[in-house]
Amino acid sequence: MSEPNHFFTRVVPAVLAAVLTLPAFAQEPGELWEVTTEMQAAGMSMPANTQRVCSPKNATDAPMGVPENEQCETYDVQRSGSTMRWKMRCSGSPPTSGSGEMTYAGKDSYRGAMQMKVGTDEMSMKLSGRRLGTACDAGKVKRHIAAAQAESAQYQEKFCQTGVEAMTAYTFTGGAGVQCSPKYKEQYCAALRTERGYDKVADFGESAQVPAQMRSDLGAARAVCGLPATGANSLEAMRSGLCRNALAKESLVFLGRNCRDEGKDLAMRECAGRNYTSPVAPKYAEFCNAYARHNALPETADNSAQPAEAQPADPKESAIKSGKKALRGLIGF
């Protein structure tokens, strides 16, 4: 079960808002009802919440507080005298299901209860309503609801688009409380196969201490995109292919940052053994800085105390070893 504070600050207000979104369609005029809800969940109770709701005047039923939108449906509705029973379910994140019962006192008031399950959490709700009879604009309620839904949809679209741009895997795991269209996850996984996308994700580093649904590192990306641990379609195979292409087309920054083995020969040739009298060529400066974080260049042995005959005979090996410290001094690593 979720922590109580999290449940009451995020889940319960969302459900309460849905329950009070009554079916005020384009029927006018309307009349006011006073609707009161009481909730219990996660071992805690919320104070009674009373709101005035404009219901269409010629509606066949009093406003009973069942969510009605494209993600929710009411089914298995049964009537027995003045009592009505129903079941409901809503898709989305988190999914919601429940059942309810309402007893009407004529057309002027009602009392009832609902049992709901929101994700893995359960809640109970008491409902009551009474007709106030004051005239109101039922269409205005509908317009307000439509505007709020449009604003929410716009925010969700922007959030999902930003997740693709920033390559944040948690955007597509439900960890942020938003359910993105499958097209955005497809765009994310396609971007992961590019230098730009892979580099962004790799730069997040390891985040094993972060909850799985809020991670954006390479492991999270592999899970979101359903990549195998090994083989031709694995993340490592993807990286290796990007590195080969980066080497071929001299995409040097990506090569330096992500391709320790594939870029080593170039690093040995253009980065190792450089000093102030033989600096790194400007073309390779960013590559050398990026590659230095791999710490893959050989250490320089201190042979100053060795007799001359003990020094390495291979000039190439000697140049490599003597170049490492000079490179570190030159590029700051």
Image: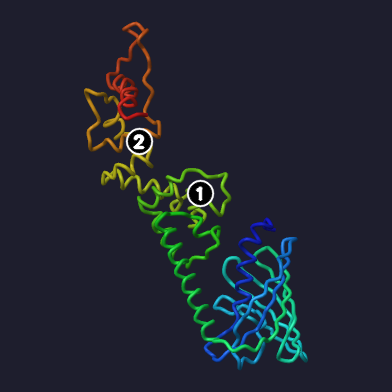
Callout 2: SS: helix
Q: Position of residue 319 (x, y in %)?
A: 29, 21
Residue 5's disc is: none
Give the residue displayed 54% in from the left and 53% down from the top.
214
Q: Position of residue 133 (x, y in %)?
A: 65, 89
In terms of image quadrants, where is residue 29?
bottom right
Report crowding for label 1: few under 14, some 14 to 19, many 20 or more residues within 10 A (C-alpha): many
Q: Position of residue 276 (x, y in %)?
A: 24, 24
Callout 1: SS: helix
Q: Is residue 180 above or below residue 282?
A: below
Q: CA distance from mark 2 to mark 1?
A: 22 Å
Is 79 situated left or right of 58 in this image?
right
Give the residue displayed 44% in from the left and 69% down from the top.
154
- Foreground residue, 11 or 251? 11
In terms of image quadrants, where is residue 305?
top left
Which mark sits nearer the N-terminus, 2 or 1? 1
Q: Amino acid at mark 1?
A: Gly
Q: In the displayed image of the protein, which residue is found farthest to the right?
A: 81
Instruction: Identify the residue position indicated by label 2 in the image.
Output: 291
Q: Amino acid at mark 2?
A: Tyr
Is 104 situated left or right of 265 in this image?
right
Q: Position of residue 178 (x, y in %)?
A: 52, 64
Instruction: Identify the residue position indicated by label 1 in the image.
Output: 219
